[in-house]
Image: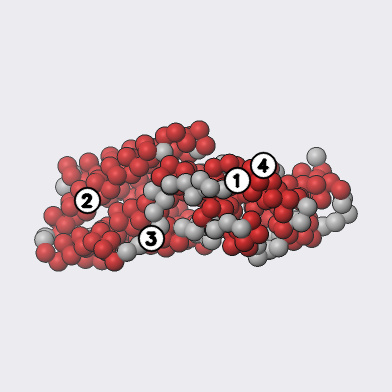
């Protein structure tokens, strides 16, 4: 038990500090293009998990009581619906949050109506229902699994861990320190998996979202000559070098192509297999690769700015993701 407690404390520390870093580095508009609901609830989810881990630390180290804390229960109940709305926007291509959907948070009222023990158990029962929804939603995207098969495997491991924790919550005494050590470790392990996935493919959320749009969306291009529009898009990028505009957005390109924003997104998604942000990064990186070789005396920063990136860090991040190395190493090799 002591060994497990030490492991859990290490994982608690990792998850708290990594969670804060994750919020600051991952939840940005470039990764959540047109997915603001996911962005907001993703931040809420991480903050709730950080709060839960802090409670676990205080309990395991200082024996601070959990079975009287209403705030701890509130954080538990926030996790499932927050994760639902974070995932729903990505997995179902449904980003609008309506007033009726507040019903997902009605369960928070159970804290006031039932005993702490039953409220604690119900939190995991409700969470199991959301996990079942997650499993069904991921299965619906199975035809796109080749795009992110390794990530799905890692996320499946997290899913299995979450199921195991839910079972333990139902069968183990809630006063048992071993359960909280295991629960804290499971959250820390989940953060570790997230760290692996996002470092490997930081724009994974955008790719999953685009796969969902292809799965569920009704085509808006039935009366559009896609070949002509793609040819014009290529001209705008290759000859007019529209990507050099650091503030270039979908509306600007859609106007140039005489399309709506949704038509532009579908045109790129279905014909090129990319999201808009991915496509734009790809165009900029291809141009940067040429400049790095043709202008050996130009600084890496100046080239990054020339092709449209707003900062050196954004340039390095995109270059490393798409090319697999840094701009300086690419030029050297």
Query: Residue beneath label 4, please?
Result: 324
Q: Whole-percent x and y of residue 45?
A: 37, 58
Q: Nearer the viewer, residue 33 or 227?
A: 227
At x 73%, y 50%, the residue is 235
Badge 2 element: helix
Sequence-wise, the earlier of marks 1 and 4 is 1
Count of number-bearing discs: 4
Q: Is residue 123 left or right of residue 313?
A: left
Query: Residue beneath label 3, please?
Result: 96
Query: Residue beneath label 1, please?
Result: 225
Query: Residue beneath label 2, please?
Result: 126
- Circle 2 packing at 10 Å, graded few (<14), some (14-19), many (20+), is some
Q: Whole-percent x and y of residue 266?
A: 53, 48
Q: How was the colour assigned to the protein in this rendering?
A: secondary structure
Sequence-wise, the earlier of marks 2 and 4 is 2
Tell me the CA gap for discs 3 and 2.
23 Å
Q: Whole-percent x and y of residue 53?
A: 35, 57
Tell me the CA gap for discs 3 and 1.
30 Å
Sequence-wise, the earlier of marks 4 and 3 is 3
Tell me the CA gap for discs 1 and 4.
35 Å
Q: Quadrant of residue 102?
A: bottom left
Q: Depth-wise, is mark 4 or mark 3 nearer the camera? A: 3
Sequence-wise, the earlier of marks 2 and 1 is 2
């Amino acid at each position: 038990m002591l060994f497990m407690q030490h492991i859990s404390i290490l994982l608690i520390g990792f998850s708290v500090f990594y969670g804060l870093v994750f919020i600051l580095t991952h939840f940005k508009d470039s990764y959540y293009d047109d997915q603001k609901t996911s962005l907001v609830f993703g931040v809420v989810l991480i903050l709730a998990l950080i709060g839960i881990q802090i409670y676990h630390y205080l309990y395991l180290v200082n024996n601070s009581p959990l079975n009287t804390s209403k705030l701890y229960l509130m954080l538990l109940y926030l996790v499932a619906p927050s994760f639902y709305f974070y995932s729903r926007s990505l997995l179902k291509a449904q980003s609008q949050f309506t007033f009726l959907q507040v019903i997902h948070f009605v369960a928070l009222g159970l804290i006031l109506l039932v005993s702490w023990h039953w409220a604690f158990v119900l939190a995991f029962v409700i969470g199991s229902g959301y996990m079942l929804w997650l499993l069904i939603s991921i299965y619906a995207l199975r035809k796109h699994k080749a795009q992110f098969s390794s990530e799905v495997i890692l996320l499946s491991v997290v899913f299995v861990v979450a199921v195991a924790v839910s079972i333990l919550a139902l069968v183990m005494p809630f006063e048992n320190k071993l359960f909280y050590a295991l629960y804290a470790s499971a959250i820390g392990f989940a953060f570790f998996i997230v760290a692996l996935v996002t470092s490997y493919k930081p724009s994974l959320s955008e790719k999953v979202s685009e796969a969902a749009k292809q799965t569920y969306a009704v085509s808006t291009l039935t009366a559009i000559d896609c070949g002509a529009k793609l040819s014009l898009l290529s001209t705008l990028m290759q000859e007019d070098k529209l990507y050099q505009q650091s503030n270039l957005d979908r509306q600007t390109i859609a106007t140039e192509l005489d399309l709506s924003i949704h038509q532009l997104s579908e045109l790129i998604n279905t014909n090129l297999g990319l999201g808009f942000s991915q496509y734009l990064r790809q165009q900029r990186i291809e141009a940067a690769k040429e400049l790095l070789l043709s202008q050996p005396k130009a600084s890496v920063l100046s080239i990054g700015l020339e092709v449209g990136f707003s900062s050196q860090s954004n340039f390095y991040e995109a270059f490393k993701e798409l090319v697999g190395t840094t701009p300086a190493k690419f030029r050297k090799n």
